[in-house]
Image: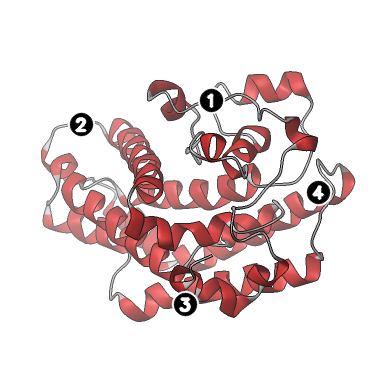
Amino acid sequence: MIFPDTAFHLNVSQHEAVIRIGCFLVLFTVIAIAEIVAPRRPLSVKKSLRWFGNLSVHLVNGILPRLLFPILPVGMAVLWAQKGWGLLNIAPLPEAAAILLGVLALDLVIYAQHVLFHRVHFFWRLHRMHHTDLDLDLTSALRFHPLEIVISLLIKMAVVALLGPPAIAVFIFEILLNGMAMFNHGNFRIPARPDRLLRRIVVTPDMHRVHHSVLLQESNRNFGFNLSWWDRLFGTYQAQPSAGHEGMSIGLTGFLDVRYARFWKMILNPLDKG
């Protein structure tokens, strides 16, 4: 079916950038304050150095897709709805069910993509830049190689092309992905009991921190960004790091040097032998 409120979906697409920037700034501010008020771990690298590098990469990642692609996933979903393309524009599903299915499908694909980027050497050369951060805080969520961002975007667009989810579903997912990535990379403390309750549904900072352990057997766990269900379902869940959150080492063997926090060292990381 073609979703009836096409004007609403088109309006979302037209104002996507403004809404996403607004949500980003609000969430960034809230999480940054939480990191100051209740830090989980002391930082080992000067924050100004890490933040300049991580935010510079994020700026490139915000501009590059708009230069390379005439249409992005939300706009693509609007076009697909207008043309009646994609499985969810053909199957007679209620819009609420289609939105939920669209968000869940995209989240599962991003989980699978994350696993793939750890398993396949070519993709790992791109993704490992994310793991060379020697501390973990909300800016670590912004530290992805531009080529990884482009590949991830192509994967999301392929899902949109096949599934044809409502534009609002793609929009919700993009907001959730960006916000939850900052949340679960955050260096702030959540008491043990609320953390246990939260991680039944979503990925918490303590859960995701395990994934950034210098130990390979731990960095190959907890791949989820939004929902914690996928790690439990596919056997990649680990509750806690073996050395504890205060005692664990964060980073990647071969890249445990502060120079990898610099912008050009991050951009050239796939070429570095480590």
- Circle nearer the viewer, 1 or 2: 1
User: Given contact means CB atoms under 8 Å apart, are the residues at marks 4 and 1 in contact?
Assistant: no
Q: Is residue 162 above or below residue 237?
A: below
- Residue at the spot 45% in from the left edge and 52% down from the top edge: 174
Where's residue 44, x and y in %?
81, 56
Residue 93: give its label: 2
What residue is disc 4 on?
35
Q: Is residue 79 above or below residue 249?
A: below
Residue type at numbered disc 3: Ile
- Circle nearer the viewer, 2 or 4: 4
Q: CA distance from mark 1 to mark 2?
A: 25 Å
Q: Categorize mark 1 by other alpha carbons within 10 Å: few (<14), some (14-19), many (20+).
A: few
Mark closest to the chain's N terminus, 3 or 1: 3
- Circle nearer the viewer, 3 or 2: 3
Residue type at numbered disc 1: Ile
Pick the quarter of the image with the N terminus.
Answer: top left
Where's residue 257, x and y in %?
69, 64
Residue type at numbered disc 2: Leu
Q: Categorize mark 3 by other alpha carbons within 10 Å: few (<14), some (14-19), many (20+).
A: few
Of the pair 74 and 28, the residue shown nearer to us: 28
